[in-house]
Image: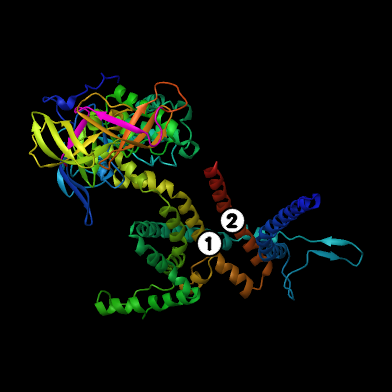
Amino acid sequence: MAGPKPALGAWQDPSAAPLVEIRNVTKTFGSHYAVDDVSLTIYPGEFFSLLGASGCGKTTLLRMLAGFERPDAGRLLIGGEDVTELPPYRRPVNMMFQSYALFPHLSVADNIAFGLRQEKLPRAEIRERVAAMLELVRMGDFAGRKPDQLSGGQRQRVALARSLVKQPKLLLLDEPLGALDRKLREHTQFELVNIQERLGITFVMVTHDQEEAMTMSTRMAVMNEGRIRQIGTPSEIYEFPSNRFVAGFIGAVNQFEGRVMEQRDDLLLVRSDVAGTELRVRTQQAVAPGTPVVVAVRPEKVLLTTEQPPPGDNSLSGSVEEIAYLGDVSIYHVRVPGGALVEAQLTNRARRAVAPLTWGDPAWIAWGADDAVALLE
Amino acid sequence: MPSPSSSDRPQRGRRSLRQRLHLGRGTVAGIPLLWLGLFFGLPFLIIARISLSEVVIGLPPYSSLVDWTAAGLLEVRINFGNFLLLVQDSLYLDAFENSLRVAAVSTLLCLLLGYPMALGITRVREGLRVPLLMLVILPFWTSFLIRVYAWIGILKGNGLINNFLLWLGVIDQPLHLLHSDFAVYLGIVYAYLPFMVLPLYATLSKMDESLLEAAADLGCRPLCAFWRVTVPLSLPGIIAGSLLVFVPAVGEFVIPDLLGGPDTLMIGKVLWTEFFNNRDWPVAASVAVALLALLVVPVLLFERFREKEQT
């Protein structure tokens, strides 16, 4: 079933029918709010990631979609049907477990056939569909093996095949690449996206690895302490974080605390003591003067020069305190007079053994008003 | 101060250490072998030898296999008559059959009772598991014989159960509970249940709970997940527990003797009668040898199953 490439941006299409609707769902364990009033809509064909540190509630949310946990409040809808009270075996959903949860007493083929046997399908059809799945995950030669005779990567592929063979509307993946070593993980990321696009099944993945979420997802939700802090495409979340938590969680960021002095159309003038100067940042929202605000700018957006840059939006002078040479890029920490330590990332485009800047050198850093974001939360 | 002799010394020391380790390993493996040879192999050979002799009046009450005759001939007399008797006299065959049936039914009852118990213990919260397991093991703190005698007090005509039922008015004649097949089954199931529960608990508690979630996720209701995941995965425990109940139950003597009726025919009781009442050691010995041969079969089958599991 080689469906069309998922229509990117289904969440922007007002006429699109959502596949998953999570409405004000709350789940507590004792007095601890694992999931706290979460609402989320996922559209068909999406590869949606729930991203957060361990204990942020992402796995609990996934387990509620699978039916292993019942929400204390709120509703869960899949394909327009309320599944809140449905047990796992009645949901049009399959899950790939973090531990893979392969049945140790069954062969690879029998593991994959488990769900189909449950539907009392004819033997020939089961055989056919299992063979197709084995081919999809390139495990045809291992059909007769038991799980404990497989490598970690092979087990992962069997688990994927087993969860896909019933052609669920929605596939849930709990840290699907967590147990693989780094090299295999990168390779498998692309394979997983490839399979998702070929089958057209909606994927919801839980991960703590931001790089993984950025690489694979159409959209992602960043979670913290049981709440969703931001939902968006990877680039929206990286470039336009809506709050300090998201800005700090995804990638590196320089944050300057300050107060709004005035707003000229969409340009915000911010007085920041730590930066030691007035910062300019573009924003779409209206902010009253005096409001505390954080100006956030990514290290790779910061320009580092030895000479004073031409007058622009933001430029600060300081001295180089630390240099980290990573091969492709170098990271400089520059102390500015206000006391802030600013991180700037430079791509090493030219080959040279000696860096143009060294510890203690005076340096200028600069960035445009469009390159930073103003964070109010 | 690196001199040739000093660099030699640790090597020599290492070699002798390895030899000592080897020796140590041999000793550790040898102790159980020695134990088995001394307290199982040797007695078994004696019993096997007696089973091939004839009964005589005297001490010992059996003939010797090898004799020097006056003519200087070495005479070897091996008597297979005892084993022939086991096949020909229906008493022994009936007793074997009865024992196997009682043991099989008791094993099944133990499994049916023990499985929910073991499964239940794995499902309660952590802090409750050890106390519950303790309750399973607790009866071992009292002598086996005393526990069987206690059942006499419970089951007899004016025992606990009958008196209670009479007091309730449910019955007006005491029930015949003691000295019946029912009492034998009750006694065996009661005495051997822990041997079923413990191995079952050991395998069930090792089971990964996410496997049941995976089964549910793939469309299995709880009962289906039980049959398709829990039971197959606990098979080693089921087999080990069944053997631990079945094998001793076949040869059980005390329970049928104390709780069974006069017509409760079990091979352990026959063995006792031949030995002590009839003083026919050769027949008693041949019953013992036959019983052992019979019980080796399921144990070997279990071993083969385990080997198959490992490959």
Question: For the magenta stretch, what is the residue range?
Answer: A356-376
Q: Is B286 rendered above or below residue A135? A: below
Which comes before the other along the chain, label 1 or label 2? 1
A307 to A39, vertically: above or below: above
Q: Is residue A372 magenta?
A: yes
Which one is in front, A63 or A161?
Answer: A63
Q: Do we see residue A7 in this rendering?
A: yes
State the separation of the CA atoms marked 1 and 2.
10 Å
**For residue A184, which numbered disc appears in the image?**
none
- The residue positioned farthest toward the right in the image shown: B71
Is A375 within the magenta? yes
Rendering quarter of residue A306: top left
Question: Pointer 1 and pointer 2: residues touching (CB < 8 Å)?
Answer: yes
Place of residue A112 in the rendered image (x, y in percent of width and height, measured from the top left): 38, 33
Q: Nearer the viewer, residue A287 or A56?
A: A287
Amino acid type of the residue that numbered disc 1 sits on in the rendered structure:
Val
Q: Is residue A20 visible?
A: no
Q: Circle 1 is placed at which residue position?
A: B250
Displayed quadrant of residue B186: bottom left
Name which residue lies at 55% across and 52% down: B298
Which three-letter amino acid code belongs to the residue tagged 2? Leu
The chain holding disc 2 is B
* Crowd band around label 2 with a 10 angstrom C-alpha radius: few (<14), some (14–19), many (20+): some
- Chain to which mark 1 belongs: B
Residue position for label 2: B294
- Residue B33 left/right relative to A250: right
Q: Is residue B293 left or right of residue B226?
A: right
Q: Give the residue at x 72% y 63%.
A: B49
